[in-house]
Image (tube, grey):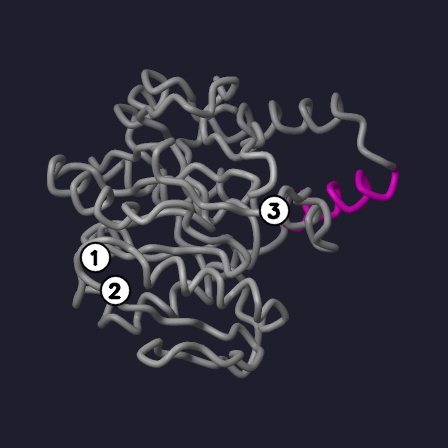
């Protein structure tokens, strides 16, 4: 968003220090000017904020349609930085060793404490963030994607703007036979924050949850999935204003177009279940 120039420079420096072949970098100004960047870093300035998935899709196209000019794309938040110099090499090795690996989700750790929030471990059993595993989704601001995934299933859903766009892509990738890994040894330092700091958080989380289900789940699972999340939301006892925003987004999710519907196969439902997260929660 152009308002963290020091953090962006630190991130770019950490990418430049990666072992192995240099990493080609594109910085997308999502409706804002791009601050000064090191020589060799490409920039793209969009006239308006397209949201997180829209901005990342534009960045992908900078490497050819669907990113096809490269094999792997890293997506990194501008206020994070790579903790170690071997992350790019670990990515290359992981994708080369497993031809069905489509996406890698990095571990996000606070730079001061080294701790990882439970919400940053993309599985239900999140007590041990140091355990790497197969997972069913990934973290949008710290990941690597094989560009063949985009070629097969398409990019992130632009209309989501913020929230759940990663799970939408993850479910489509899994349905196409790709796998997703959470790797605790690939670390992005990022300050500990609360997602609810965003003014649109509660509305878009609810709206996009409905869109996610309508787009991707077999019809029988749509009410189950949304019913579970409605119950969980109520059990968390949000504030009155937050709950009003949530229900407004929930209604919006049903009243507005969600994009093309491509329900996942039942064998994908079983695969998600075996991976520890059936698509009802």
Locate residue 132: give its quadrant.
top left
Q: Is residue 6 above or below residue 108?
A: below
Is 281 displayed left or right of 274 in the figure?
Answer: right
Instruction: Residue at 40% x, 79% y: name it.
Output: 43
Numbered disc 3: secondary structure: loop
Mark 3 sits on what residue?
Answer: 191
Helix, strand or loop for disc 2 = helix
Q: Quadrant of the N terminus?
A: bottom right
In the rendered structure, are the residues bearing label 1 and label 3 in contact, judged by CB atoms less than 8 Å apart?
no
Looking at the image, residue 243 lies above or below residue 220: below
Q: Which residues are magenta?
A: 240-252
Judge whether 82 appears above or below 62 on screen.
above
Q: Residue at x 53, y 79 (%)?
A: 35
Q: Which residue is mark 1?
A: 151
**Mark 2 crowdedness (10 Å alpha carbons): few <14, some 14-19, many ≥20:** many
Q: Nearer the viewer, residue 102 or 14?
A: 14
The tag earlier along the polypeptide, 2 or 1, is 2
Q: Which residue is mark 2?
A: 66
How far separated are the C-alphas under marks 2 and 1? 6 Å
């Amino acid at each position: 968003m152009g308002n963290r120039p020091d953090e962006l420079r630190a991130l770019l420096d950490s990418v430049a220090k990666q072992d192995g072949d240099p990493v080609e970098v594109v910085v997308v100004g999502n409706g804002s000017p791009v601050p000064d960047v090191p020589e060799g870093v490409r920039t793209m300035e969009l006239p308006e904020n397209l949201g997180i998935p829209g901005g990342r899709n534009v960045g992908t196209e900078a490497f050819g349609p669907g990113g096809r000019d490269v094999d792997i794309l890293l997506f990194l938040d501008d206020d994070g930085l790579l903790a170690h110099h071997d992350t790019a090499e670990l990515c290359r090795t992981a994708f080369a060793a497993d031809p069905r690996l489509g996406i890698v989700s990095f571990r996000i750790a606070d730079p001061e404490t080294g701790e990882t929030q439970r919400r940053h471990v993309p599985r239900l059993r999140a007590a041990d963030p140091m355990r790497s595993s197969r997972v069913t989704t990934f973290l949008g601001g710290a990941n690597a994607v094989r560009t063949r995934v985009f070629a097969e299933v398409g990019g992130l859903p632009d209309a989501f703007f913020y929230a759940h766009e990663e799970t939408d892509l993850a479910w489509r990738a899994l349905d196409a036979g790709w796998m997703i890994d959470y790797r605790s040894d690939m670390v992005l330092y990022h300050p500990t924050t609360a997602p609810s700091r965003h003014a649109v958080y509660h509305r878009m989380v609810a709206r996009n949850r409905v869109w996610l289900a309508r787009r991707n789940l077999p019809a029988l699972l749509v009410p189950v999935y949304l019913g579970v999340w409605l119950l969980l939301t109520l059990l968390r006892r949000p504030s009155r204003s937050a709950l009003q925003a949530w229900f407004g987004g929930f209604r919006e999710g049903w009243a507005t177009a969600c994009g093309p519907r491509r329900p996942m196969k039942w064998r994908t439902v079983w695969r998600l279940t075996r991976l520890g997260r059936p698509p009802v929660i």
